């Protein structure tokens, strides 16, 4: 079942011309934007269009997918989170414990979202 792209929230594609998007050719972009920034109506559209299997298959390969979106799809599809590229990539790897601010200050992670200056 194909639903016109103009039924998706326009804020998802503020940086691209929606007239140039195609549900098949732009599948990765559409799925990632809806999972990370979409509304429930957007989710329902991609669910009806692609199905959970195709959404999960695509989400697994997205390096920049938000970890919360990956967790959501992991639960729905029963695919272990460890198989998602966004989880295993350096950016969201759990073993990264240090961060550096723009000013060059070093921080060390001391809990889920709490950093201390070194």
Image (tube, helix red, strand yellow):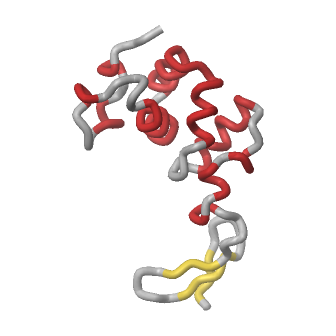
Viewport quadrant of the C terminus: bottom right
> Closer to the camera, 48 or 37?
48
Whether residue 88 sits left or right of residue 102 in the image: it is right
Q: How many marks?
A: 0
Extreme residue toward the bottom, this view: 118
Q: Is residue 71 above or below residue 108?
A: above
Query: In the shown orientation, is residue 4 left or right of residue 111?
Result: left
Which of the pair 90/41 is nearer the observer?
Answer: 90
Report the front residue among 15 and 40.
Answer: 15
Among the 4 quarters of the image, the one containing residue 92: bottom right
Which residue is situated farthest in the front direction here? 25
> Residue 2's quadrant in the figure?
top left
Residue 57, x across and y down, in percent:
62, 33
The residue at the far top in this view is 1
Residue at 59% over, 42% down: 69
Q: Residue 52: percent from the left, percent from the top? A: 63, 23
Q: Horizontal placement of 16 versus 28: left or right?
A: left
**Residue at the image position 63 percent from the left and 66 percent from the top:** 113
What residue is drawn where x is 50% and y is 88%?
A: 105
22 and 80: which one is in front? 22
Q: Looking at the image, is 110 positioned above or below residue 30?
A: below
* Residue 14 place in picture, x, y as percent: 27, 40
Picture quadrant where residue 18 is located: top left
Please give the name of the residue rendered at 66% of the width and 63% of the height, measured from the top-left corner.
Answer: 93
Residue 33 horizontal/vertical position (percent)? 43, 38
């Amino acid at each position: 079942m194909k639903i016109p792209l103009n039924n998706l929230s326009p804020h998802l594609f503020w940086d691209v011309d929606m007239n140039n998007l195609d549900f098949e050719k732009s599948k990765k972009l559409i799925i990632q934007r809806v999972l990370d920034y979409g509304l429930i109506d957007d989710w329902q559209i991609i669910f009806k269009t692609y199905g959970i299997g195709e959404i999960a298959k695509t989400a697994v390969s997205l390096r920049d997918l938000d970890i919360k979106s990956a967790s959501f799809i992991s639960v729905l599809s029963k695919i272990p989170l460890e198989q998602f590229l966004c989880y295993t990539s350096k950016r969201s790897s759990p073993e990264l414990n240090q961060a550096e601010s723009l000013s060059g200050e070093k921080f060390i992670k001391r809990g889920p979202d709490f950093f201390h200056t070194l």
